C-alpha cells in the first residue's frame, strides 16, 4: 500500500490509517492535523476560523456558512406535526463559533474539543435561543437534520411559553427538553441516520437532553398520540408551578 500523504510504500507490518479508500502511514498520521468533522488526516487541510481543521473530503460536502439552511429545515417541520406541534417556528440562522455555541448551552468546564464528537458529547451543534437558530460552522447534513428537528421543537415551545430558550433546571425544563430530544431521536431513526441516533441516545451529557430517557421508555409502550397526550397533560402544569418562580429567582424574563 502507498501512503496518500507521502507516497511511500507502507511496510506490511506497520499499522496505518484508512478512510475514503486512502491509506495514511503511521509516521504521517502522527504529524498532520486531523479533520474536525471526520478525523481524516488530509492532504490540503484548511483551518476554519472558530471551528478547526477541515479536510479535502469534507470540504464542499458539509452544510456550512452561506448555505441555504432554510431549504434543509423546511421539510423537517413535517416531523413535528405528528407530535402536536404546529411546525411554524420562525427560522433565522446564525453561524456561531464552536466555543460560543457551547458556552451558550453549558457553563461546565468540559475538555477542549478535538473533533466534532467531543463537541456533541456536551452540546448541541444546533441551538435555539432568542429567535435565532445558532449553528456550528460546519456539519454533515444528517447532523444538521437530526439536531435541527430537536431545536425546531425547542424553538416552538420556548416561544409558546415566552422563554428565550429551554435552558433551566426545573422539572418543566427537564420535561420539555426531553420531549424535544426524543422527537429528534425518533426522527433520526426513521430517516435511517444510525450514527446520529446513537449520538442522540447518549449525548449531550450534563442534563442537556432533559428527561429524554423517560420519553424513550414511554415510547416503547405508547403510540405517538398517547405521548402527545402525556406531554400536554404535563408541561402546562409544570409551567404554572415552576416558570414564574424560576423567573423571579433571577432567570432572564421573556421578551
Ligand atoms: Zn506517509
Ligand atoms: Zn473531513
Image: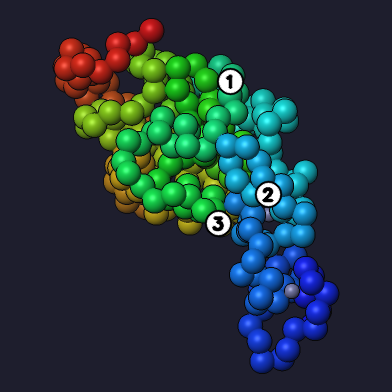
Mark 1 close to ligand 2, CB under 8 Å: no
Q: Which residue is mark 2?
A: 54
Query: Which comes sooner in the sequence, label 3 or label 1?
Result: 1
What residue lies at 21% left-to-right and 16% top-to-bottom? 250
Q: For the residues marked 3 and 2, what is the alpha-carbon distance in whole angstroms?
A: 20 Å
Earlier in the chain: of badge 3 and badge 2, it is: 2
Percent x, y of residue 36: 60, 51
Q: Looking at this rendering, what residue extends furthest in the bottom direction?
A: 13
| Residue 183 location (% of width, % of height) | 46, 39
Give whichever of 141, 18 is nearer the camera: 18
Element type at marker 3?
Answer: helix
In the rendered structure, the answer to whether residue 127 lies left or right of residue 110 reads right
Q: Residues within 10 Å of mark 1 (few under 14, many from 20)?
A: some
* Badge 2 residue CB within 8 Å of ligand 2: yes
Residues at discs 1 and 2 in contact (Cβ within 8 Å)? no
Q: Quadrant of residue 158?
A: top left
Ligand 2, seen in the image, is in the quarter at bottom right
Residue 154 is tagged as: none
Please tell me which residue lies in front, 36 or 139.
36
**Residue 195 numbered tag:** 3
Q: Position of residue 71 (x, y in %)?
A: 71, 28
Estimate the spatial distance between the alpha carbons at disc 1 and disc 2, rounded to whole Å. 27 Å
Disc 1 versus disc 2: nearer the observer = 2
Q: Is residue 138 visible?
A: yes
Q: According to the image, label 1 marks what residue?
A: 91
Say what secondary structure mark 1 lies in: loop
Amino acid at each position: 500500500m502507498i501512503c496518500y500523504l507521502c507516497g511511500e510504500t507502507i511496510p506490511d507490518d506497520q499499522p496505518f490509517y484508512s478512510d475514503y479508500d486512502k491509506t495514511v502511514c503511521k509516521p504521517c498520521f502522527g504529524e498532520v492535523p486531523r479533520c474536525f468533522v471526520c478525523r481524516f488526516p488530509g492532504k490540503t487541510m484548511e483551518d476554519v476560523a472558530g471551528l478547526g481543521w477541515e479536510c479535502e473530503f469534507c470540504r464542499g460536502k458539509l452544510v456550512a456558512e452561506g448555505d441555504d439552511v432554510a431549504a434543509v429545515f423546511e421539510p423537517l417541520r413535517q416531523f413535528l406535526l405528528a407530535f402536536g406541534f404546529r411546525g411554524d417556528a420562525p427560522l433565522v440562522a446564525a453561524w456561531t463559533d464552536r466555543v460560543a455555541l457551547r458556552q451558550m448551552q453549558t457553563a461546565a468546564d468540559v475538555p477542549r474539543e478535538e473533533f466534532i464528537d467531543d463537541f456533541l458529547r456536551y452540546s448541541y451543534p444546533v441551538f435555539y435561543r432568542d429567535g435565532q437558530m445558532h449553528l456550528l460552522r460546519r456539519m454533515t447534513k444528517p447532523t444538521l437534520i437530526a439536531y435541527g428537528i430537536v431545536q425546531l421543537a425547542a424553538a416552538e415551545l420556548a416561544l409558546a411559553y415566552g422563554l428565550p430558550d429551554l435552558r433551566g433546571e426545573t422539572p418543566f425544563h427537564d420535561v420539555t427538553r426531553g420531549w424535544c430530544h426524543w422527537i429528534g431521536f425518533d426522527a433520526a431513526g426513521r430517516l435511517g441516520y444510525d450514527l446520529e441516533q446513537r449520538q442522540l441516545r447518549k449525548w449531550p451529557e450534563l442534563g442537556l437532553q432533559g428527561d429524554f430517557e423517560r420519553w424513550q421508555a414511554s415510547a416503547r409502550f405508547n403510540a405517538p398520540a398517547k405521548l402527545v397526550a402525556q406531554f400536554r397533560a404535563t408541561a402546562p402544569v409544570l409551567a404554572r408551578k415552576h416558570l414564574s418562580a424560576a423567573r423571579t429567582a433571577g432567570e432572564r424574563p421573556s421578551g
